[in-house]
Image: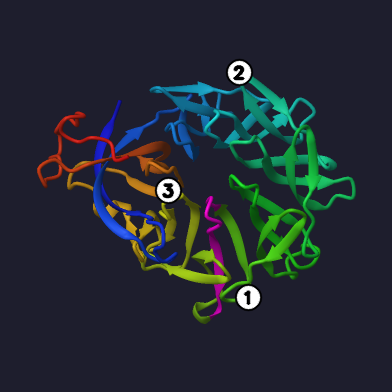
Amino acid sequence: MKRIIVMVVFAVFLSGTSAWAAADKVATYTVIDLGTLGGDRSYAFGINDAGQVVGYSRVSGGAEHAFLYSGGTMQDLGTLGGSSSQAHDINDVGQIVGYSATSDGPEHAFLYSRGTIRDLGTLGGASSRAFAINDAGKVVGWSYTAEDEGRAFLYSRGTMKNLGTFGGNSYARAINKAGRVTGYSYLYDYSPTDGPWLAFLYYRGTMEDLGSIGGASRGWAINDRGQVVGTTLTLAIGNLDHAMLYYRGTMKDLGTLGGYASYALDINNRGQIVGDSEMAEGQNHAFIYSGGTMRDLNDLLVPGSFDGVISSANAINDRGRIAATALIDGNPRAVLLVPVRKSHGKHPAVGDTVTRDRAQETE
């Protein structure tokens, strides 16, 4: 298995510190190529605190199947009878959610647990997708209703609940331990001329508008502190998406890596944020944001250690491990970044073998 050593900065979120900044601590990363299910590409979307990763991969026949990567092995999770599936999140119990084509054709949200993939149904319409699950087994996502309207849902104890809307379609993207849900909703019925969309926080029957910096926003992830990350439009620079952090009534623009747009995709309970950003040259690079600074993971690679590009960091757990997608030989590939401590104040040289006595995992 291919391993690459990466250097990156991460933040330890201490009790009582500001929501916007944390103490930086330099660490290195081992980057593990997770491989594929037999095809030429794979994508990683979710990770739990045990370091298990989920996503999807092409199989040898060309279809895309959801996978679970655990203990060095990528496992095909199958489908709901159709040709394709994607996994988007995994909780600490090992339950996995995503969506799959059914034998009848439309995609349905699924819950995978103990070797079985289960159809979660819809809100009465043709299709649904699940994007996140908390440790209590509550699932959030999006579904069509019988009226052919797209609505955010919360699935719990066998029931799928419509979370409502600000007027148009709504989408739930993440849920935390307390059951707080974030996502976004259009203000009007969706069409190319309608909008804008606004990030929301849903809790105990109420959908709260989180506002925006430039007229629109989307909630993409939430941690147990209630910090929300996602995107906000920035009217001052051409109405483009920027990564944002929302906390206690304030939304902060996290900036970019030099290009026009950026996207915050996950936040852990330490306050570390990951995502991707456009570069000045136009391509996308993965970033980690901590201590008030956004850093390009590719700039932090040990020279000569990696020929590809880490293009998107999609999820981060509380141990600082990151599920990401890299371009390797021109193809997208799921990778896992594992933090390790420096040894004697030096980073491992290219080609060194990383052992636990030389570079131990950061807890």
Residue stretch rendered in magenta on the structure: 222-235
| 344, 117: nearer the viewer | 344
Left or right: 34, with 200 as reference point: left
What x and y, as percent, mark residue 207?
73, 60
Q: Residue at x 62, y 34 (%)?
A: 97
Name the residue beneath numbered marker 3: 313
Residue 115: give its label.
Answer: 2
Q: Is 228 contained in the magenta span? A: yes
Q: Is 78 contained in the magenta span? A: no
User: Can residue 22 be seen here?
Assistant: yes
Question: Tag 3: residue type?
Answer: Ala
Q: Is residue 224 above or below residue 216?
A: above
Q: Residue at x 43, y 55 (%)?
A: 271
The quarter holding residue 36 reads top left
The quarter holding residue 5 reads top left
Question: Tag 2: residue type?
Answer: Gly
Looking at the rendered structure, the secondary structure element under dot 2 is loop
> Which one is in front in this view, the residue at disc 2 or the one at disc 3?
2
Residue 215: give its label.
Answer: 1
What x and y, as percent, mark residue 160?
79, 40
3D distance between C-alphas at marks 2 and 1: 44 Å
* Quadrant position of the N terminus in the picture: top left
Left or right: 47, with 204 as reference point: left
State how many labels appear.
3
